[in-house]
Amino acid sequence: MKIVIIGSGNVAYHLAKAFHRNQMAISQIFGRNETDLKSISAELQIPFSTTSLMDADLYLICVNDDSIGEVSQIISKENCLVAHTSGSLPKEALRGKFRKASFYPLQTFSKSKALDYSKIPFFVEAENREDSELLKNIALKISKNVMESDYEKRKYIHLTAVFSCNFVNHLFARAKEVSDSQNIPFDYFLPLIDETVSKIHEMEPKLAQTGPAVRNDERVLQIHEALINDEEHLKIYRTMNESIKKMYEL
């Protein structure tokens, strides 16, 4: 089976690497960024091109959501399967006479960060049972966690991912701004962050909550607010504390 990955960003790189590690041949990686494509090709021994898209049985489109429709139009082959890797778009975002599908890995990807691909959940959807089984079997060669999911469910999966990953990481970035403002090494907070994440492997997040808001400690909350000079930080601090209070009906 000939598989082509379209894209050269974080998702494309990690999918190519996951396939490579599991002895699954990628026929080509195709995209616009020649520098990134060369780097992936050199590391994983995958042919690349910026000009000529190879004929394939399966195309995996790993580009940003805004580009998926446009990029899919370069695929002229009609009797092939094309899947995007977006968590927030339906398979119908793909434009062409080919068979449409979704192949969504639930993970945050950075090229410089190694991953255990076997733990990444994959959610697949296709127009027919045969294609769905094909994508599941491909994903199962990479991961132990593979499920079917229609677009309606996948939207909520992606929303949950934004809350649990993107928002949390943004808070880390804001926290570092606070520590940097006082010349406090952010590394000091890594054991606390690690323990916070570790706890939710064993406890419901709601039961793991600590801090002044869940205790309704107005004295500490007021002290903190008096320390905050940055308007964005103050807005976040108040919004988060109000949300915590509402959850625990304080």
Image: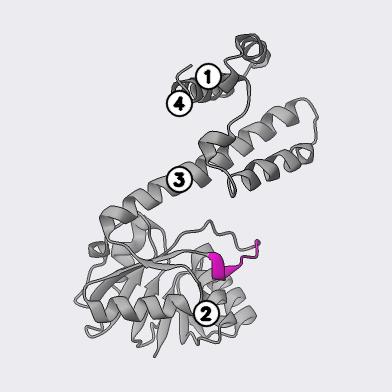
**Residue 170 screen position, x and y as percent:** 56, 39
Q: Which residue is mark 3?
A: 162
- Tag of residue 153: none
Q: Which residues are magenta?
A: 112-119
Label 1 element class: helix
**Residue 77 screen position, x and y as percent:** 25, 84
Between the residue at mark 1 and the residue at mark 4, the CA separation in whole angstroms equals 14 Å
Give the residue type that dot 3 points to: Val
Q: Is residue 34 above or below residue 199?
A: below
Q: Which residue is mark 2?
A: 19
Give the residue type that dot 2 points to: Phe
Q: From the image, which quarter does the N terminus lie in? A: bottom left
Q: Which residue is mark 4?
A: 247
If you read the primary sequence from the N terminus, does the residue marked by circle 2 or circle 1 appear first? Answer: 2
Between the residue at mark 3 and the residue at mark 4, the CA separation in whole angstroms equals 19 Å
Between the residue at mark 4 and the residue at mark 2, the CA separation in whole angstroms equals 43 Å
Who is closer to the viewer here, 136 or 205? 205
Q: Which residue is mark 1?
A: 238
